[in-house]
Amino acid sequence: MTDTTTSAAITEPIVPKPVSGTVDYLDQRVGAASMIKGLSRKLFPDHWSFLLGEIALYSFIVLLLSGFFLTMFFVPSMTEVHYPEDALPVTMQGVEMSEAFASTLNMSFHVRGGLLMRQIHHWAALMFVGSMVVHMLRIFFTGAFRKPRELNYLVGFSMLILSLLAGLTGYSLPDDVLSGNGLRITDGVVKSLPIIGSYMSYMVFGGEFPGTDVIPRMFTLHILLIPALILGLVALHLFLVFWQKHTQYPGPGRTDKNVVGYPLFPVYMAKAGGFFFIVFGVLALMGAFMSINSVWNYGPFDPALVSAGAQPDWYMLFLEGSLRLMPGQPEFVILGWTLSLNVLIPAVVIPGLLFTFLGAYPFIEAAVTKDTGEHHVLDRPRNAATRTSLGAAFLSVFIVLLVAGANDLVATHFGLSLNAITWVLRVLFFVLPVVVFVITKRICLALQRKDREVVLHGHETGTVRRTADGRFYEVHQPLDEFERWVRVGHHVYRPLQLAPAEDANGVRRPGGRLDGIRTTLSRFFYEDRVEPVTPAELATAHSHGEHDQLPAGESSRVGELTSTSGTSH
Amino acid sequence: MSARGRGRRSRFAPMLLLAFALVLVGGIYTAVAPNAAQADTQTTGDAAHGEKLFITNCATCHGTGAVGSDLAPSLIGVGAASVHFQVTTGRMPMQASGAQAPAKPPQFDESEALDLAAYVATLGPGPEIPTEDQVDPAQGSPANGMLLFRTNCAMCHNAVGAGGALTEGKYAPSLMESTPTVIYEAMLTGPQSMPGFNDATLTPDEKRDVIAFLMEQRGTQPGGFALGSIGPVSEGIWVFIVGLGSLIGIAVWVGSRSS
């Protein structure tokens, strides 16, 4: 016995026997070695913003783990019970409620760790959607959705929609007043659909709202169907990231044909593995110290009740805001049929438009650029001025709707008039996106011009020299190659030109109207632009003596806006 | 003192100085600040003294004899409870015209408020100030109070009484700091935008149940920090600031170590 351990220690000084044995077992049966060898050397580029999606992934894992715990104690039933007289909290003793609500109270007050798990689950849910949205913003503003990643963008987009559904269904399960208010709004939105609305509502709730079917139905959706779909899409999402390779930020040596980064093993295994525990830790701390969705504050659901400050979770708040901003008048009765435009427009049409824009954007941009090349180097947001401005305008609308959803809290906390806030937000809903678009675009173009300036002239050093003949000039520090790479490497799109309606032989141009729209959009996107510095320009700039000064005639061209309008500048 | 340390101060010196100054100022304030009026056992005031106070402080708007004017309503028949509520919460005398009179540090102490209340009560019969027994939360049922509160009060005051917005800059104030007596008086008299709940709408026992429910909200929160008890909006703000904020901070750190 002693002999064998000694010899093992000599022959295998690094890897302990149980590990090497297991690995060998797996290798002989499924060929694990070659698989791991390939995967472990796969390179990933490094940047903090690439971890945003990981936050979402890890939050999802925390959701699965804590959610599994919660299903052990939750009873998805609307059977009426009386909460025990001797159970906590005292405000609920003997109160009539559904079994779903009673089991939620019981798990919060009488199951060891139950409230902690509930709070971790809820914080993780908010974090999941929040990190998804921020991740999506990163994808949007850096152009990571371009070919070949349009499909993966749609996979992510679908997950966002599914996560909203997961949130809505999960939020409704405890059957408290607040979640019931949310369901009532859902019911109202469904009913606002012309013709089919009331039938749809009866189908969803199994009769008149609220009925007794909705909690068991939501439960099945929330714990089975939606997580299974999300899990499948997560797998597809990650597989596509692997398969198509990760994008990288522009930098020295980085092109569309390579990946510059570190290997999966050991660098990213350590980073990602460690980051999982950090995310889990932060969520656990939040669950431990910050109360969330204290359902006993609201009490069991009763359709007659609604309390002040009734709002949905933040990811549904834009919908609430949209409903709060809409004036109530446009409701019409046509031949006995009610057309509730006051609900249909804010709750169906506006979210529909917002999400359509979000989902369709990669395809719109591909259509107006007619670019069929692959892109693996990300854009700096300033270099895609129109995209960045559209994204910022979109965000401004979203934020207006968020604030509108919380208009009563804004009123009480800032001592303002609720009516004034609502009117200001109604105006901002239309005006702010335009203003934000224009300002963002100007900022982007100005930053591009600054890039040109710096590439051609170098950094200002603040050192002013005087020459022997009395002239003053500022010394400029030329950029090194690494700095320059980032500033001149990007591609600039030009507006598409519409071919003549008929060619020389009188044959009409194919494409017709669609081409016209495409050209108009293309002009909107790329009419204003700043050309990156060409090697020739750089050579010219550098050939002008040791103090980087350009002759007046040439320097006026620096950062000049070029335009296709044909007029000479 | 070492040679190295002689010439310069520690970089923590300004912070320590600031902390010291804050403690000093805070300490002095605590020492000399006026103490909040102590509730005494006196239950009936001196109407004659109350009349003098009224003429000096209230008659400008409410008129001599409290008959009312263009600026303020008549107080004949509002009762002692109404005066006690308005004066002890500092709402009256009003500081400035506005959407509604906000609560502020009271201008009169408890006995002066009782004198004023006694004077106004002599002008016409009205609701009386509740007794200690009537507002004792220990004798009420928090569970029944919860049911009553959410049916009658929560639509303006929020589910646990954290307050909420009304139209045109008016608001239902937070009830987290209000005394049981003041809560009872508010229910009874319906100050400002609030409807009154007379003893036929909410019996005295039911009013006590509501008070018991509200007092129950002030204990330890089972889930940790209550985050203002205003629901999902504050939770959303916290998840972005504390949760996502710290995680993005850590992500920057993780991402910076190898590049």
Image (tube, rainbow, N blue to C red):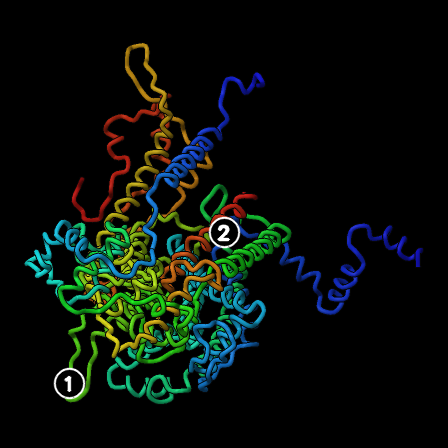
Q: Quadrant of the N terminus of chain B?
A: top right
Residue A458, x across and y down, in percent: 37, 30
In which quadrant of the rendered view does residue A399 lie? bottom left
Q: Amino acid at mark 1?
A: Ile
Q: Is A230 left or right of A365, judged from the image as shown?
A: right
Residue in the picture at 14% in, 67% down: B124
Decide which of tag 1 and tag 2 comes sooner along the chain: 2
Q: Residue furthest top?
A: A468
**Is residue A505 visible to us here?**
no
Q: Amino acid at mark 2?
A: Lys
Q: Is B149 left or right of B249, judged from the image as shown?
A: left
Q: Is A61 left or right of A540, judged from the image as shown?
A: right
* SS under mark 2: loop
> In whole angstroms, how far apart are the C-alphas of marks 1 and 2?
61 Å
Which residue is nearer to you in this view: A410 or A202? A410
The chain that hosts pointer 1 is A
Q: Identify the mark at residue A334; answer none if there is no mark.
A: 1
**Is residue B75 visible to us here?**
yes
Q: Quadrant of the C terminus of chain B?
A: top right
Residue in the picture at 29% in, 74% down: B152
B37 in relation to A507, above or below: above
In which quadrant of the rendered view does residue A375 lie? bottom left
Residue in the picture at 58% in, 56% down: A277
In which quadrant of the rendered view does residue B210 lie? bottom left
Mark 2 neighbour density, 10 Å: few (under 14) some (14–19) many (20 or more): few
Mark 1 neighbour density, 10 Å: few (under 14) some (14–19) many (20 or more): few
Residue B90, x across and y down, in percent: 24, 54
Q: Point out the frontmost of discs 1 and 2.
A: 1
The chain that hosts pointer 2 is A
Q: Identify the mark at residue A257; answer none if there is no mark.
A: 2
